[in-house]
Image: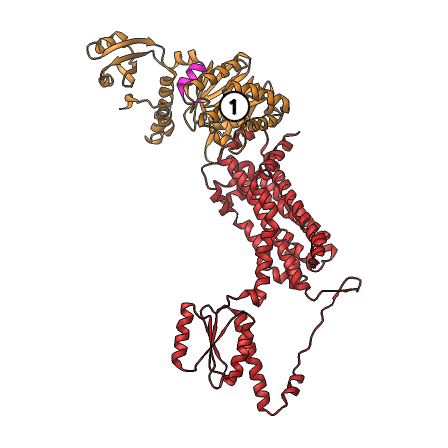
C-alpha cells in the first residue's frame, strides 16, 4: 500500500470505527426529519399546535360566543363566558398573566364596525388569532348582509369561493398527477436534503479541521512529516474522512430508498415523490462536491489555527456561505428560476445546496447544470492548491494566532 | 553519512540557521547542542525535508534529500506526539507503514522492541492509558522500528526514569555499533557528554564550536576542579583566584583564574570544609557550554547596549544549577 493509502485507511478507521459515527449514521436521517419536517407539520395542524388553555370572551351575543366556542373547540380549548363589566375583564387579564387563561377576547357593542380586541401573554399564537378573526369575520359579514336586506342564502351563494386545481406539466406537456400538495412535500424533501448536505458538510469540514489542529497541537505532525509530505498528509486526511462520509451517505440513501420503495407502500403511505433514485444520486453528487470544497477550506484553517477555539473563529467565512442558502431555502423552492436562484446555483460556494434545490423542484437547463459542475470542479482544484500551501506553512507554526490576512500571504508566497 | 554545507534558513525577521556546515558519520553519535532557540529544531526539520533551506545543501550518502529518503530516517521529536485513542501496537504498525515497511516485518519488529522496553503487555491498550514514561518509550520505538540508517533524537531522555534511561541508552549505543548515523540534539550537557563522539555547539543559527569532545574541551575550557564536601562552601566565589564556580550543597566545580594553582584552592578549603574528594579534571561540557554561550551573549550585550540574552539564561536554567560566577 502506498503511504497515501496508509493515511487514508488510518483516517477512515479513526472516523468510522467509533460509536458516535455508527449511532449518527443510523439515527441521522431521523434527527434531520425531526428538526425539519416535524415542526412544520406540527405548526400546521391545529390539533397538536396548541397548549389547549381556555380562552375567555367578554361581550358579544350568544350566537357569537357559540361560534367562537365551536371554532376554538377544534383546538381542544374551552371558552369561558364573562360578563362585559370592567371588573371581570381586569380579573381575566390577571389570569392571563398567571397563565390560567390563554387569551381574552373583548367585544364592545359596536364590534362589527370597530373590531374587537384580543389580549394574550405572548402575542405569537397566530393560529388562535386566525381562528378568532375568521369566526368574527363570518358573523360580521352575515350580520351586515342581513341588515342590508339581501337574502342571506343568496348572499352566501354569491360570495362562494372558487377552487383552483393545480396540475403540473412536464417537459413533454404531459400532466403530473398529485401535484396539489407537491409544494409541501417538495419543500419538506428539499429541506431534508438541504439540511442533510448542510449538516454533513459542516460536520465533516469540522472533523477535518479538528483532526488537523489536533495533529498540530499534539505534535504528532512532526512525526508524520518525518515520513510523508504535508501534501500526502492533507489529502490523506481529506480522502479518509471523505470515504467515511460517503459510507454514511450510502447507508442513508439505502435507508431512504428502502423506506420509500418498500416500507411506505406496504404501510399504505405515499412516499414523497421527490425521494427518488435520481434525486438521491444528485444529493450524493453535491455532497461529494461540497465536501471537497469545504474540506480543503477546513484543512487549511485547521493547519493555520492555534487550537480548536481559534479554528472556530477562522471558520466563519466558510460558514457564511453555507448559511446563506439555508436561510433563503423557501425563496429558492418557490422561485427556482429567479435570477437570484440561478446566480447562487452557479456561484461555487453556494451552488451545491442551491443547485440541489433547483434540481429537486424544477430541473434547470442542462447548460446551467454543466456550468455549475464545471465551476465547482475548478474551484475545488484552486481551493485544494491554496489549502496545500497554507497547510504546509501553518502545520508547523506554533505559538501564534494566525490571521486570515497572513493565510492569504502564505498562498501568494509559496 | 549526513552532510550539511553552508545551510541557511531565514524566517520573516530572523535568520534561524546561518551558514551551518557539519558531517555526521555512520557509527558515530553526533551531538547537536545549543541553547533553546539556537536553530536545532529548524536544522532537524531541514534534514527531514519538512522545510527547505533557503540555500546550502543537505545530503545523505551523497544524495540530496527527497521524500524517498524519509524511509531511511527515524525521528524522535522533542515534543512527543502520538494518537491518544489508538492502540499501542496499531500506532507502531501505522508509523512503520508510513516508512514503507511491510505489515509482517513491522509486526515482528514491534514485538521485539515492545518486549525489549517492557511494553509487550500493553500492546492492545490505548495510548492514553500509558504513563508519560511509557509513551516516551513507545515514541522511541516508533522512531527506530523500521531500522533506519539515520536517526535524529531530540532530547530522547527527558522525562524518563533511570531504568528507562539505561534501556534507551543501551539501544542508542547499539545503533551506533551497528553503523547507523545518530544525530543527537540536546541542551542537557551531561547526556551529550556521556554519549557523543563529536559535537556541534550552535547559537543563533551559527556554529560556536565543533569537534570531538576532547578537542572541544581542550580548546575551550580550563581544567576544572571538582570537590565533594560537607559544610558551607559559599565563600568559594569570593576567593581571588577563582574565575567561576558551580556550587551545589555537597558538590562544586571550580575554574581557576589564569596562572592560579590547584594547591591554592586546596589550601583555602582545608579547615573550612570537610573535603571528601578533590579532583583536577578536564572541564565538563556544561562549563564549556556556559562559558561559550555566555561569552557570546555578553558580546551581543555589548553590541546591543547590555540587554540580557535569553539564550544563555535558558542554557543554564535548564540544568538547574546555580551559576555563582554571575553573583
Q: Where is residue A148 in the image (x, y as percent from the top left)?
A: 59, 91
Shown in red, the chain is A
Q: Position of residue B286 (x, y in %)?
A: 37, 18
Colour of chain B in the image: orange
Q: In this view, does B45 lie to the left or right of A239?
A: left
Q: Where is residue A175 in the image (x, y as percent from the top left)?
A: 77, 65
Q: In this view, does B268 lie to the left or right of A259?
A: left
Q: Residue furthest bottom?
A: A149
Q: Give SS at disc 1.
A: helix
Name the residue rendered at 48%, 71% in the picture. Answer: A54
Q: What chain is tagged by disc 1? A: B
- Judging from the image, the colouring scheme is by chain
Residue A274 highlighted magenta (yes or no): no
Query: Measured along the vertical axis of the image, is residue B272 above or below residue A35?
Result: above
The residue lying toward the viewer, choosing from B17 and B149, is B149
Q: Where is residue A345 in the image (x, y as percent from the top left)?
A: 65, 56
Query: Measured along the vertical axis of the image, is residue A396 above or below residue B203?
Result: below
For the N terminus of chain B, the quadrant is top right
Crowding at mark 1 (Cα within 10 Å: few <14, some 14-19, many 20+): few
Kindly tell me whether residue A413 is visible in this rendering.
Answer: no
Query: Measured along the vertical axis of the image, is residue A210 above or below residue B273?
Result: below
- The magenta segment: B186-195
The residue lying toward the viewer, choosing from B120 and B73, is B120
The residue lying toward the viewer, choosing from B64 and B14, is B64
In the figure, residue A340 lies in which quadrant? bottom right
The residue lying toward the viewer, choosing from A382 and A376, is A376
The overriding secondary structure of the stretch rendered in magenta is helix
Q: Name the residue under label 1.
A: B121
Kindly tell me whether residue B274 is visible in this rendering.
Answer: yes
Query: Measured along the vertical axis of the image, is residue A240 above or below residue B303?
Result: below
For the C terminus of chain B, the quadrant is top left
Amino acid at each position: 500500500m502506498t503511504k497515501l493509502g496508509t493515511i487514508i485507511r488510518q483516517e477512515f478507521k479513526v472516523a468510522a470505527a467509533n460509536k458516535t459515527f455508527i449511532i449518527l449514521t443510523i439515527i441521522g436521517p431521523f434527527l434531520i426529519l425531526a428538526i425539519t419536517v416535524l415542526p412544520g407539520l406540527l405548526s400546521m395542524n391545529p390539533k397538536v399546535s396548541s397548549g389547549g388553555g381556555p380562552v375567555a370572551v367578554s361581550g358579544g351575543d350568544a350566537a357569537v360566543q357559540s361560534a367562537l366556542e365551536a371554532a376554538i373547540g377544534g383546538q381542544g380549548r374551552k371558552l369561558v363566558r364573562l360578563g362585559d363589566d370592567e371588573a371581570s375583564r381586569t380579573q381575566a387579564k390577571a389570569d392571563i398573566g398567571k397563565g390560567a387563561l390563554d387569551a381574552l377576547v373583548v367585544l364592545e357593542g359596536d364590534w362589527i364596525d370597530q373590531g374587537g380586541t384580543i389580549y394574550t401573554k405572548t402575542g405569537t399564537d397566530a393560529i388562535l388569532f386566525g381562528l378568532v378573526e375568521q369566526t368574527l369575520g363570518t358573523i360580521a359579514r352575515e350580520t351586515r348582509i342581513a341588515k342590508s336586506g339581501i337574502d342571506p342564502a343568496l348572499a352566501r351563494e354569491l360570495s362562494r369561493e372558487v377552487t383552483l386545481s393545480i396540475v403540473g406539466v412536464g417537459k413533454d406537456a404531459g400532466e403530473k398527477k398529485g401535484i396539489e400538495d407537491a409544494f409541501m412535500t417538495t419543500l419538506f424533501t428539499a429541506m431534508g436534503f438541504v439540511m442533510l448536505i448542510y449538516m454533513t458538510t459542516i460536520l465533516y469540514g469540522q472533523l477535518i479541521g479538528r483532526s488537523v489542529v489536533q495533529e498540530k497541537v499534539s505534535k504528532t505532525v512532526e512525526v508524520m512529516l518525518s515520513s510523508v509530505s504535508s501534501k500526502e498528509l492533507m489529502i490523506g486526511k481529506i480522502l479518509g474522512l471523505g470515504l467515511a462520509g460517503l459510507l454514511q451517505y450510502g447507508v442513508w440513501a439505502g435507508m431512504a430508498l428502502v423506506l420509500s420503495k418498500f416500507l411506505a407502500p406496504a404501510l399504505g403511505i405515499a412516499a414523497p415523490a421527490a425521494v427518488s433514485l435520481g434525486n438521491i444520486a444528485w444529493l450524493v453528487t453535491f455532497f461529494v462536491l461540497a465536501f471537497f470544497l469545504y474540506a480543503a477550506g477546513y484543512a487549511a484553517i485547521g493547519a493555520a489555527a492555534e487550537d480548536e477555539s481559534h479554528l472556530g473563529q477562522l471558520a466563519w467565512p466558510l460558514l457564511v456561505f453555507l448559511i446563506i442558502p439555508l436561510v433563503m431555502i423557501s425563496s429558492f423552492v418557490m422561485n427556482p428560476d429567479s435570477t437570484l436562484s440561478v446566480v447562487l446555483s452557479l456561484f461555487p460556494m453556494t451552488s451545491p445546496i442551491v443547485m440541489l434545490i433547483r434540481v429537486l423542484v424544477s430541473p434547470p437547463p442542462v447548460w446551467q447544470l454543466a456550468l455549475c459542475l464545471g465551476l465547482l470542479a475548478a474551484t475545488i482544484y484552486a481551493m485544494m492548491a491554496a489549502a496545500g500551501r497554507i497547510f504546509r506553512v501553518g502545520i508547523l507554526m506554533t505559538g501564534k494566532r494566525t490571521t486570515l490576512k497572513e493565510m492569504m500571504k502564505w498562498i501568494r508566497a509559496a | 553519512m549526513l552532510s550539511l554545507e553552508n545551510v541557511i534558513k531565514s524566517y520573516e525577521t530572523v535568520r534561524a540557521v546561518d551558514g551551518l556546515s557539519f558531517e555526521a558519520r555512520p557509527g558515530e553519535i553526533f551531538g547537536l547542542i545549543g541553547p533553546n532557540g539556537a536553530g536545532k529544531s529548524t536544522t532537524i526539520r531541514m534534514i527531514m525535508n519538512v522545510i527547505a533551506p533557503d540555500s546550502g545543501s543537505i545530503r545523505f550518502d551523497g544524495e540530496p534529500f527527497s521524500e524517498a529518503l524519509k524511509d531511511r530516517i527515524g525521528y524522535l521529536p522533542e515534543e512527543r506526539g502520538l494518537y491518544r485513542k489508538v492502540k499501542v501496537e496499531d500506532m507502531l504498525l501505522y508509523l512503520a507503514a508510513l516508512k514503507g515497511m511491510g505489515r509482517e516485518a513491522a509486526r515482528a519488529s514491534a514485538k521485539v522492541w515492545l518486549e525489549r522496553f517492557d511494553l509487550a503487555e500493553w500492546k492492545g491498550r490505548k495510548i492514553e492509558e500509558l504513563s508519560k514514561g511509557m509513551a516516551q518509550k513507545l515514541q522511541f520505538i516508533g522512531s527506530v522500528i523500521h531500522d533506519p540508517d539515520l536517526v535524529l533524537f531530540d532530547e530522547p531522555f527527558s522525562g524518563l526514569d533511570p531504568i528507562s534511561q539505561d534501556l534507551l541508552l543501551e539501544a542508542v549505543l547499539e545503533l551506533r555499533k551497528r553503523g547507523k548515523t545518530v544525530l543527537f540534539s540536546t541542551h542537557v550537557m551531561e547526556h551529550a557528554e556521556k554519549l557523543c563522539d563529536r559535537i556541534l555547539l550552535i547559537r543563533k543559527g551559527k556554529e560556536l564550536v565543533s569537534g570531538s569532545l576532547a578537542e572541544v574541551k581542550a580548546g575551550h575550557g580550563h581544567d576544572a576542579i571538582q570537590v565533594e564536601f560537607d559544610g558551607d562552601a559559599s565563600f568559594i566565589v569570593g576567593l581571588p583566584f577563582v574565575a567561576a564556580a558551580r556550587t551545589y550543597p555537597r558538590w562544586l566545580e571550580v575554574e581557576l583564574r589564569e596562572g592560579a594553582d590547584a594547591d591554592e584552592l586546596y589550601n583555602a578549603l582545608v579547615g573550612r570544609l570537610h573535603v571528601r574528594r578533590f579532583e583536577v579534571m578536564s572541564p565538563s561540557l556544561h562549563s564549556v557550554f556556559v562559558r561559550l554561550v555566555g561569552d557570546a551573549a555578553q558580546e551581543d550585550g555589548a553590541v546591543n547596549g547590555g540587554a540580557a540574552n535569553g539564550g544563555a539564561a535558558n542554557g543554564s536554567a535548564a540544568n538547574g544549577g546555580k551559576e555563582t560566577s554571575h553573583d
